[in-house]
Image (cartoon, rainbow, N blue to C red):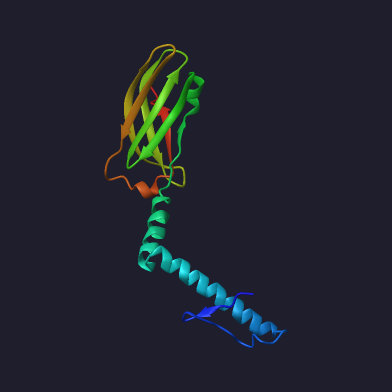
Amino acid sequence: MSHPVVGGQPFFLFTHDTQKNPVIKMLEISANIFNNHTMIFKSTRLSLSLLLSLLLLGHFSCTEKEIPVTLSIELIDKGITMTHSKANDGVVEIYLISENEAEGELLVKALNSSGLEIARSKAVMTLQKDDAKQFTFNFDTGLDLDSVTKYQVALRKK
């Protein structure tokens, strides 16, 4: 059995006895584990501050919330599908494909957690039969992006 090392010297506590006290065994095992972890940490030459920085950076880079973008029932009924969407920093990009000819003014509504509209952006849509196009919507910089929980793409009512 290997013995824990303290200060570079083997740690012997009643090691000549053939039967050890269970408490002493636990202390020796704990000291051995502690020394092994200390050596591993020292061998990697990572400082605690660097390790914490990496952990915090990883945490904050993964916490950016993804905001869903959905199509209204009216657009779906007109044979329009959305195959790609991206919402970031007040800019919403969508890629639409049409089965039939479609035209009108698209509205992207920013909705809050209560489902209420808090902002909108618009673009003119002209799609031929079996056509596709990417649209980009820019929201006003005054929009509180933390309040937006969803974007909905709709057709302006005539």
Residue furthest to the front: 16
Residue furthest to the right: 19
User: Residue at coordinates 46% horizontally, 70% vertically from top-left?
Assistant: 39
Query: Percent from the top left, x then y, of residue 90?
Result: 32, 40
Relative to 31, residue 66 above or below: above
Where the N terminus falls, by quadrant?
A: bottom right
Query: Percent from the top left, x then y, of residue 145?
Result: 35, 46
Query: Percent from the top left, x then y, of residue 35?
Result: 51, 74
User: Residue at coordinates 44% horizontally, 20% vertically from top-left?
Assistant: 97
Q: Quadrant of residue 57?
A: bottom left
Relative to 81, residue 18 above or below: below
Relative to 51, residue 122 above or below: above
User: Residue at coordinates 60% horizontally, 81% vertically from top-left?
Assistant: 27
Q: Quadrant of residue 120?
A: top left
Where the C terminus falls, by quadrant?
A: top left
> Horizontal placement of 29 versus 76: left or right?
right
> Horizontal placement of 11 versus 69: left or right?
right
Count of numbered tags: 0
User: Residue at coordinates 42% horizontally, 66% vertically from top-left?
Assistant: 43
In front here: 142 or 21? 21
Query: Percent from the top left, x then y, of residue 128?
Result: 39, 12
> Horizontal placement of 29 versus 96: left or right?
right
> Horizontal placement of 26 versus 143: left or right?
right
In front here: 63 or 91? 63
Relative to 25, residue 76 above or below: above
